[in-house]
Amino acid sequence: MKSFKPRQIIKVLEKKDFKLVRQKGSHRLYRKGSIRITVPYHNKDLKPGTLRNILKQADIEEREEILKIHSIGKPLSSNTKLREVAERTPGFSGADLANVMNEAAILTARKNKNQVGQEELLESIEKVLLGPERRSHILSKKEKEIAAFHEGGHALITALLPESEPVRKVSIISRGMAGGYTLKAPAEEKKFRSKSEFLAEISVSLGGYCAEYLKFGRHVVIWPYYLWRKRRINVFAIVLI
């Protein structure tokens, strides 16, 4: 670690391993493996010899194995499909996947169920990805109409463009900063993306604006989350020009 500067910020992304060991004299299982870290804007500091191994982002097979590890000690129902959960969590770190399993267990307890089902697992993905539901945040009738057209615009453009990822769920229930959301998931793992796929994502992101404009004649930005999406669109546009 000699190449890291004093007071330099580093972030531990995940502890990734698939080996469980039992400590002598204890009934608890401990995981042994390597630590994955990142240094913001200072990747040049990860020099050869400084770190023995730099781990890549987990693929679908590895995510499924991580989910199996974090499901130990949690009673799973017969309808639970960890493979489907792995398919719906591209880009999730090991810590994110651990949170998914923990949140699913909490949801199961709140529903007075004895086993973790697929419904709880899929709901926990949304919570980890977007934040908890804010049912206390009640939208007015006008805001609900705007939210419905906005999310409907995203979903419609997604359905019309074959290059876009399929829609899994559309909701106008507030989560985190978002007043509503259109949840997509890739049909398959991809290491490369074409220009047409990036353009499709830009089109889908702008679909909410277009739907609002056609219905109300003007665009109303209600949620800060939309501004984040807009910044991401600008980055894609600059790259593709």
Image (cartoon, rainbow, N blue to C red):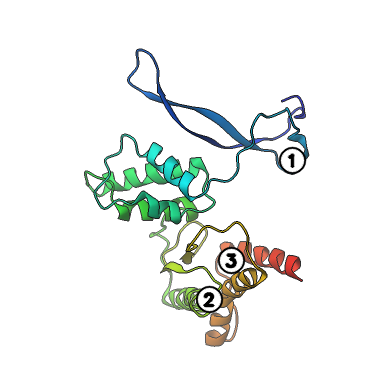
Earlier in the chain: of badge 2 and badge 1, it is: 1
Residue 77 appears at what percent x and percent y?
A: 25, 47
Closer to the camera, 215 or 73? 73
**Where, by quadrant of the figure, is residue 72 drawn?**
top left
Q: Residue at x 31, y 53 (%)?
A: 118
| Residue for point 46% across, 50% down | 128
- Residue tagged by mark 3? 226
The Cα–Cα distance between marks 2 and 1, rounded to whole angstroms, is: 36 Å
- In what element is the residue under mark 3? helix
Comparing marks 3 and 2, which lies closer to the viewer?
Answer: 2
Label 1 sits on a secondary structure element that is helix
Tell me the crowding category of disc 2: few under 14, some 14 to 19, or many 20 or more residues within 10 angstroms, Cα based. few
Q: Quadrant of residue 122?
A: bottom left
Numbered marks: total? 3
Type of the residue with mark 2: Pro
Label whose residue precedes the other's in the sequence (3 or 2) = 2
Q: Residue at x 67, y 35 (%)?
A: 10
Local secondary structure at mark 2: loop
The amino acid on which the numbered mark 1 sits, given as a three-letter code, is Asn
How far apart, in angstroms, are the residues tagged by discs 3 and 2?
24 Å
Q: Is residue 198 left or right of residue 48?
A: left
Residue 124 in picture, x, y percent from top left: 39, 51
Asked if labels 3 and 1 touch by Cβ distance under 8 angstroms, the answer is: no
**Mark 2 = which residue?**
162
From the image, which quarter does the C terminus lie in? bottom right
Q: Nearer the viewer, mark 2 or mark 1?
A: 2
Q: CA distance from mark 1 to mark 3?
A: 30 Å
Residue 206, x across and y down, in percent: 60, 75
For label 1, the residue is 43
Q: Position of residue 237 (x, y in %)?
A: 72, 69
Where is 156 relative to 88, above or below?
below
Is tag 1's residue or tag 3's residue first in the polypeptide sequence?
1
